[in-house]
Image: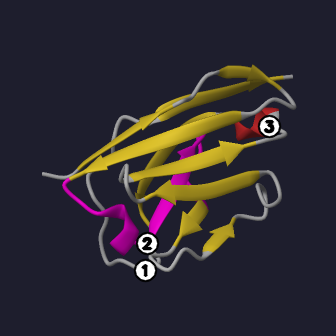
Amino acid sequence: QVQLVESGGDLVQAGGSLRLSCAASGIIVSVNAMGWYRQAPGKQRELVAAITSFGRTNYADSVKGRFTISRDNAKNTVYLQMNSLKPEDTAVYYCNRDLRYHSSGYNWGQGTQVTVSS
């Protein structure tokens, strides 16, 4: 059974940093294209960062230059380093397969709440 467990969210001031973690079990993250998604209240879930099985990364324009996605194959974990946080980054953050490369994703985890105060 696949399980994705996100953690690391917190309440931070604008300009601060956080590192999110996504610990995976039941899959090998290094052979999947993985992504970090976020969903703000009243908005659709959006992909903000992704990493392919080859390690190539890409980002939504709104986070480019501020967020960095990475993975630790030994820990089977995907990370999202978030710097220069803005109030508009406030959302619940989830990880899953990058659905641009996979026909389906896994069951969504509980996500981790990031709140950025101004």
The residue to which callout 1 is attached is: 101
Give the answer, above or below, for where 35 lies relative to 43.
Answer: below
Q: Which amino acid, by three-letter code, is at mark 2? A: Ala
CB contact under 8 Å: marks 3 and 1 = no
The label shown at residue 85 is: 3
The residue drawn where x is 74% and y is 21% is: 12
Q: Position of residue 55 (x, y in %)?
A: 54, 74
Q: Position of residue 99 (x, y in %)?
A: 42, 71
Q: Which amino acid, by three-letter code, is at mark 1? A: Tyr
Task: Specify the quadrant that holds the C terminus.
Answer: top right
Residue range of the region highlighted in magenta in the rendering: 26-48
The residue to which callout 2 is attached is: 33
**Magenta span contains residue 8:** no
Classed neighbour count for the residue bearing mark 2: other residues with Cα under 10 Å, few (<14), some (14–19), many (≥20): many
| Quadrant position of residue 68 | bottom right
The residue drawn where x is 69% and y is 65% is: 59
Q: CA distance from mark 3 to mark 2?
A: 25 Å
Look at the numbered disc 1 and give the secondary structure of its residue: loop
Give the answer, above or below, for where 27 lies relative to 8.
Answer: below
104 horizontally vs 19: left or right: left
